[in-house]
Image: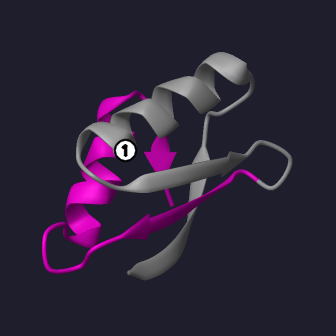
Amino acid sequence: MKNITLQVEGMSCQHCVNSIEGALKEIGAKGKVDLKKNTVDVSFDEIQITIDRIKETVEDQGYDVV
């Protein structure tokens, strides 16, 4: 498993947390949102999922990965 931390803008509430963590789970990754730091820690199998796919998944939920 590979672990990365993404800086994400636009998150502000529990709905944001649920949206991002749920979307990552759907593609097979495990995400943990930290609203105070504006980060998402992601664990994933890099053989099955690319970092670009993870970023795209977060952005598809309406947030900006910086």
Q: On the image, numbered disc 1 is attached to which residue?
A: 24
Q: What element carries label 1?
A: helix
Residue 60 pos. (x, y %): 29, 33
Residue 32 pos. (x, y %): 62, 51
Q: State the residue lying farthest toward the top.
A: 15
**Vertical arrangement, residue 66 with respect to residue 35, above or below:** below
Question: Split into 4 quadrants, where in the image is the N terminus?
Answer: bottom left
Residues shaded magenta: 38-66
Residue 4 pos. (x, y %): 50, 76
Q: Nearer the viewer, residue 3 or 58?
A: 3
**Vertical arrangement, residue 51 with respect to residue 8, above or below:** below
Q: Nearer the viewer, residue 45 or 13?
A: 45
Decide if residue 11 is on the left or right side of residue 34.
left
Decide if residue 51 is on the left or right side of residue 11.
left
Residue 35 pos. (x, y %): 77, 42
The amino acid beneath tag 1 is: Leu
Q: Local crowd at mark 1 within 10 Å, few (<14), some, or many (≥20)?
A: many
Q: Which of 50 and 43 is in front in this view?
A: 43
Residue occupying the point 49% across, 78% down? 3
Q: Which of 29 and 61 is in front in this view?
A: 29
- Which image quadrant is residue 53 in? bottom left
Residue occupying the point 56% across, 25% down? 18
